[in-house]
Amino acid sequence: MSEPLIQIEQNRLAGDWTAVKPEFRKGTYCYSAAAKNLQYLGLPNPREWQPSDQDWKLPADWKQIILDGFKERLGRFRSLRLFMDICVRCGACADKCHFYIGSSDPKNMPVLRAELMRSIYRRYFTATGRLFGSLAGGRELTEDVIKEWFYYFYQCTECRRCSVFCPYGIDTAEITMIGRELLNLIGVNINWITEPAANCYRTGNHLGIQPHGFKDSLEFAADELEEITGIRVEVPIAKKGAEILFVTPSADYFGTPHYFTLLGYLALFHEIGLDYTFSAYASEGGNFGLFSSHEMMKRLNSKIYDEAKRLGVKWILGGECGHMWRVIHQYMDTMNGPADFLEVPVSPVTGTRFEHTKSTKMLHIAEFTADLIHSGKLALDPSRNDKWKVTYHDSCNPARGMGLLEEPRYILKNVCNNFHEMPADTIREQTFCCGSGSGLGTDENLEMRLRGGFPRANAVRYVKEKHGVNLLTCICAIDKATLPTLLDYWVPGVEVAGVHELLGNALVMRGEKQRATNLRGEPLAQGNISSSAENSDGSETIHA
Amino acid sequence: MKAAYAFVVVLALTGAGMAGGASAALRGPLGVFVPYAAFVILLVGICLRVWLWAATPVPFRIPTTCGQQKSLSWIRSSYLECPSNGIAAAIRLGVEILFFRSLFRNTRCEVSERRAVFGDSKLLWLGAMVFHWSMLLILLRHLRLFIEPVPSFVLLLQRVDGFFQIGIPELYLSDAALTAGLLYLLWRRFSDPLVRYISQLTDYFALFLLLGVAVTGMLMRYVSNVDVAAIKQFALGLVTFSPVIPKTIGSLFFAHLLLVSALAAYFPFSKLMHMAGVFMSPTRNLANNSRMTRHVNPWNYPVKKHTYDEWQAEYHDKLVAAEIPMETPDVRAANTN
C-alpha cells in the first residue's frame, strides 16, 4: 500500500474524558445513511447530512426522543439496566478491545464506551446523578454527546471479547446495540448498515440482487464447478417439498473469496444427494438488522421461517456466517418462532438427530459436515490442499455467541495436511475480531478498520513467521470480505478462505474428472493430481 | 482531584464520628439512630434495586460462550464455560462469584513497533480475591459481637485467622489481607494510567470508605484496646432492639460505626451493588441452549414485514423470466411456456 503506515501511538492519558470531543477525521468514521434507504424501511428523520457537518439536522425534540427511548429500553432489557448499574471500572476490559489496541483511543476501552451511555443514565435516571450531577458521574445530554455516541458506537463491532473478561459479564455488544437503536430513533445511522438492511427487506438479500440475478449467479457457480470437477450439479431454487432449506449469506454467491465456499457447498450437496433448496425470497442469512435495532433484526429474520413454512421443508441448514449465527442461535426462535411447522433436523445421510437444534430446527453447516466426516460418509483427499498452510480464525459470533469451536477445526484437520493454531490468547473465546464486523466493513473508515483488525493480523503474522502459514480460514462472510484487505496491509502473502472451500477441494466426488485445479482455478501440484486420481476411482472410499 | 475530594469526605466522616462520640449529646443519635437508619436504607435499597432488575425482562438468551457448545455427541462440550443446562449455568455462575473466573483470564496487551504482545496478568485477580475473601471473613468474625453464645464456626474462623499468633492481641490475617487488598486496588487506580483515566470520584470514595472502616477497626483492636465486652453489649442491644450505649465505648468506635453506616447507606446507590448484580447477569447466568429450548420474550411485538406475496408481486415478471417457481403461477406464465 502506498499510504504511510499506521502508527499506533500510546496516548498520554490525562484530564477528564468528558471534556474531549471526537474529531471526525476522514478514514475513521462511516458515512450517513441515504434518505431513500430510511424511507424504504420507514425509519425516522430521512435527510441529507454527513457526520462531518456541524449541523446534523436532528429533529427538534431529539433530546426527548432519546430520553424516552432510553427509558423504554431500560424497562425492556435487564442487560441494559444491570450493565448501567454494576460496572466497577476495574479496567479488566480496557486492553481487550481490538479497537483500543489498534487506536489507543481511550474511549475505545469498553469501559469508557459504556460510560458514554452510563453517564447519561446516571444524570437522568438515577437519584444520585440527578442530585450530584458530575460528582456522581453524570453529565448533560447534548448534541456533542450524540456525536460521540455515533463515533464510538460505530467503532465497536459487537464482538463480545470484552464480555469474556468482565467479572460481571458486562457485554459491550448490548450497550452498542442499544446505543445504535437510540441513534436510529433520531435518524443518526450509517449507510453501510441501512442500505443492506433496505436491500434485504426488499429483494431478500443485502446486495440487492433481484431474483433473476440470484439464479444466474447460482447457475454460473454450477458451470464453474462443472469445469473444475466435470460434474454438473443441480441448484434447486424455491423447490417446494424439498427436505431442507439452505440459507447462506448473500456474499457467498457474489463475493470473493466467499464464492469458492459456495462451490464447496454445491459439490458437497451434490455428492451426498441432499434434497435441498435455495430460496430467492430468503436469499440472505446475514442480518444487518442486528446492527441497527432489535426490531429491524426481527423484520429481516422473519423471512427465513416464513419461507421454510411456505416451501414445506422439514428443517433449515445454514451456511458459514458470523452475525447470521448470532441471530439464529440467540434470537430467531424467540423473535419469530416457535418453528412448530418444522421437524427436528436429522441428517438424511448419517441418520444423526441433531437434538441440540430441536427447538430452532436450524443446523450449522459445520455441524452437518463434521457429522458426515465423522461417520465416514465423505471421501476426502487432503493433499489437494497441500498448497496451503492453514490457520483458523474463530469468527466472533460463532465463538462467543454460540460456542462453535471444534466443528470447523475437525473439518479442517480432515481436509488439509498442514494446520497450525494461532496463539491461545487470540483464538476460540478469546478470538480477535476482523475489525470490520457489525456493519463497519466499508471503505470510508478503512483506517479504523485496519487499526481494529491489527490484533488479528498480528496473530496471523506470528503463525506466518513461525509456520509459514499462507491461508487464514474462517466461517464468517464479513471476515471473508474484509480480512483480505487487512492481511494485505499487515501480513501480505496470507490469503483468506472459507472452511467449505477447503472441503470442496478435498472432496472426492463420484465420477469426477481428474482435477487439475482447486476451486479457485489455481493448478494443483503434480503430486496432488495423481493422488486425487487414485481416489477418484472410488475403490477405497465410502459413499453415502 | 477526584481522589482528594473522596478522601476529604471520608476524613470528614471519620472526624464527625470521633467528635460525635466525644459529645454526650450526640452519642445517642450516632449510636442508635444512624446505624438503624443506615441499615434500613441498605436493606430496602438492595431489595428495591434487585426487584427492579428482576422485574426487567430478559428478552433474549444471550450467554457469552467461553467454550465448546454441546452439539455432536462425540465432541466434548465445555460444561462450565458453555453450560448447556440450568444446573451447569448455576455452577458457572458459582465459579464466577466464588473464584472470579473471568478476571482470572485477564491478559495484558503491550503494543510497540507495530506488534502486540500478550502476557498473563493475574495481579488484579489476586488483589480482588484477597480483598473480597478477607472482607467476607471479617464480616463473619464480627458475628461474635452480635450473637451470644458465639457460634462455634465463628470461633473456629477466629482461631484460623489468628493462627500465626503474631503480636498481642494476635494479628488476624484477614485484617492484613483486607488492608493489603484495598491498598493494592487503590494503588492501581493511581498508578495505572488507564485505570486512573476511567476512575471516578465514586470509585475512590468506595475505596477510601472501606479503608476508613478497616483502619478504625484495626486501631481499636491493635492500638487502643477498646472494651470489647462493652461493644458486644452495644451490638446485642442493637440487634435485640433495646439499644444501650455503655459509657466505656470510646469515640474511635463511633468513627468506625459512622463509617460503616455511611457504607451501608451508600451501598444500594453505588457500584457496590455489583455484589447482587453479578447473580443476575444474563451473559453469565443463562444456559447456552437457545436452539434446544425456546426462550420467550414477554414483550415480543409484531413487526412490519415484507411478505412473500408482496415480494412475488414486485418481482413477478423477473421470476417468470428466470423460471423460478412461484406460489401462484398465473396466466401470463402459462402462456409464455
Image (spheres, coloured by chain):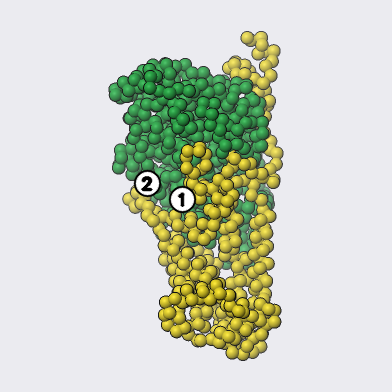
Task: Output the letter for the chain in yellow.
Answer: B
Q: CA distance from mark 2 to mark 1?
A: 17 Å
The chain to which mark 1 is attached is: A
Point out residue A473 in the picture as x, y percentages from the top left corner: 41, 36
The chain to which mark 2 is attached is: A
Task: Output the letter for the chain in green.
Answer: A
Residue at image location 50% in from the left, 76% down from the top:
B158
Residue at image location 59% in from the left, 57% down from the top:
B279
Residue at image location 52% in from the left, 79% down from the top:
B217
Q: Viewer-nearest of labels 2 and 1? A: 2
* Mark 2, other Cα within 10 Å: few <14 / some 14–19 / many ≥20: some
Mark 2 touches mark 1? (CB < 8 Å): no
Q: Earlier in the sequence, mark 2 or mark 1?
A: 1
In the rendered image, which residue does mark 1 sit on? A97
Q: Which mark is residue A423?
A: 2
Mark 1 residue type: Cys
Q: Nearer the viewer, residue B258 or B177?
A: B177
Question: How many badges with numbers are in the image?
Answer: 2
**Is A105 rendered above or below residue B133?**
above
Q: Which mark is residue A343?
A: none
Q: Secondary structure at mark 1?
A: loop
Point out residue B107 in the picture as x, y percentages from the top left corner: 41, 55
**Is A410 rendered above or below residue B337?**
below
Q: Nearer the viewer, residue B149 or A41?
A: B149
Q: Nearer the viewer, residue B271 or B142?
A: B142
Residue at image location 56% in from the left, 84% down from the top:
B228
Image position of A173 (left or right of A128): left
Mark 2 residue type: Pro
